[in-house]
Amino acid sequence: NSYQDSFEKLVALKKLCQDLGVVTTPALIEGVWVVPVLGWYHFDWDNEPDLQPPPGKKLDREPIPAESLATDTGACLWGNLKNGTLELASKLDLQNEEWGGWPLPASLQENLRNPRGQRKQPVITFSHFLPRVQLMPEKRFLFQPNLSKIVGSDFIRRRIDGLQPDVHVFGHSHFPWDMTLDDGVRYRSWPLGTPEEQARRIASLPQEVTEQWHPQAIFDSDSQHYRSSESCWFSLMYTRIQREPESCHLADYVAYAYSPHAPRVPDSIISPAGFLEVHSEDERTRREKYSGKSQRSMNREMRRTNNPE
């Protein structure tokens, strides 16, 4: 109640960062450029078709609208601009200039004149929202298919396209991810997740490292990438199947909610680790410990889908 709207709160947040010495602009840190990219989602970033029923059929129920999925619909007030609009996303893209990230430092611009791999210093960029739709599971794999409409920004993508970093780190989706796309950029996400999401991860891959879920090293000043993780099961899935957003083959939990007669994508394709035998007594105990919580959270998601009110 102490701020007129979220724009005013952003100004206060910027001042707080300055007072605390928080770095919010591009910086060369131990031989690596780290570049924050600010942005906000807009619904039409999602350029893939809606959830597809089998030919000649209709969905049993429509997915929950995107605006009902986003807590910021009520928590963030942007004057007369609405969440999810291109106009608001464009306005918030300008925060990159307001916060001093752009124009980029001259030394960074000089570094970027060389192609990736030939630069004096590697470049890591990061954003909260997603720059590319390929970094999100297709709607046929989502409890809430319209989630894709509130996670990404073309404005962020344009800035990433201009920077051509070695690695781009993103958040928001809650899906561990590791994928190199056609632009040559390696995109990574390593979310802490909710307790329920953590339980599903551990039950599927009951290793000690999955339970501990430490911060993940991704890159070093010698331009060496760190290895991926089996926990990035959705991005790994796309090494086994093509991205086909127009397909009516649905994950079992999606078909259950929206189109029970749709053909299925086998669970073993989505997360094969969950079907593998454990390698030790510790892993067996860990899977048993988290399986109940994992299944309850899955059931809760399906009930929410069927009873959105």
Image (tube, rainbow, N blue to C red):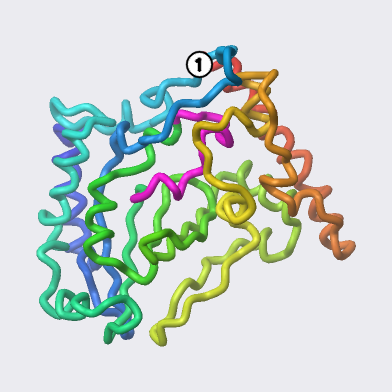
Residue drawn 54% across the image and 54% down it: 176
Q: Relative to 177, say whether 7 is above or below.
A: above
Spot occupied by residue 256 in the image (x, y as percentages of width and height): 68, 22
Say which element carries label 1: loop
Of all residues, the one furthest to the front in this rendering is 55
Q: Nearer the viewer, residue 203 or 113?
A: 113
Q: Which residue shows up at 74% across the image and 36% down it?
A: 295
- 10 Å crowding of disc 1: few (<14), some (14-19), many (20+): some
Is residue 233 inside the magenta stretch? no
Q: Where does the magenta region start and end?
A: 131-146
Q: Residue at x 22, y 60 (%)?
A: 17
37 shown above or below 69: below
Residue 67 vertical position relative to residue 195 in the rendered view, above or below = above
Q: Amino acid at mark 1?
A: Glu
Q: Nearer the viewer, residue 124 or 258?
A: 258
Position of residue 193 in the picture relative to residue 103 (left or right): right
For label 1, the residue is 62
Q: Residue 122: where, in percent of width, then height?
A: 33, 79
Based on the picture, tell me whether residue 136 belongs to the magenta stretch. yes
Give the total number of marks visible in the rendering: 1
